[in-house]
Image (cartoon, grey):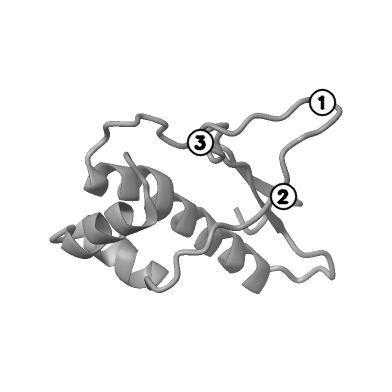
Amino acid sequence: LFEMDISHVFHCAAAVSFSQPLEDAAVSNITSTLQLFQMTQRLNSGNTKDARVKFVYISTAFVHGGNTGTSSEPLDEELFSLHPYDPVELYKSMLGSQSYASAAMAKLGFPNT
C-alpha cells in the first residue's frame, strides 16, 4: 500500500441491525473503523510526499432515530453527548461484560444497538 498513490480512505460499511448483540455491533461498527483509521495513519507515516491521505467516514442513515428532515430543511449534523459515560469504557464494555454499556444505553435512552 505504501507504494500506491492513495489520496483518501473511505469507510462506509457498517451493520445496521437494531437487534445485533453489543459485541457484534462493536466489532462491525467501531473496531473496523478504528482499524481503517490506524491504517490511514500508517499510510501517512510512510508517506514521503507532502500530500496526506485523508480518512473519510460515512455514517448510516439511522443516526437520527425517529427524526426526519427534507431536502429544503435537512437535519443538523451534531455529535450526541455520551456524558457522563466514557466512550473508550463503553467500547470496552461492549466487547466484554456489557454492563457499563447496557447501563449507558438505558440511561441515555437508546432502545437498541
Measured Cα–Cα span from mark 1 to mark 3: 18 Å
The first of marks 1 and 3 along the sequence is 3
Badge nearest the viewer, 1 or 2: 1
Residue 56 in the image: x percent, y percent? 67, 50
Residue type, label 3: Gly
Badge nearest the viewer, 2 or 3: 3
Which residue is depicted at the point 82% across and 25% down? 71
Residue 67 in the image: x percent, y percent? 59, 34
88 lies left or right of 33: left
Residue type, label 2: His
Q: Secondary structure at mark 3?
A: loop
Which residue is depicted at the point 62% across and 63% down? 43
Residue at image mark 1: 71
Quadrant holding the C terminus: top left
Q: Secondary structure at mark 1?
A: loop
Residue 102 in the image: x percent, y percent? 23, 55
Residue at image mark 3: 65
Residue at image mark 2: 8
Which residue is depicted at the point 16% across and 61% down? 99
Is residue 10 or residue 88 the one in the foreground? 88
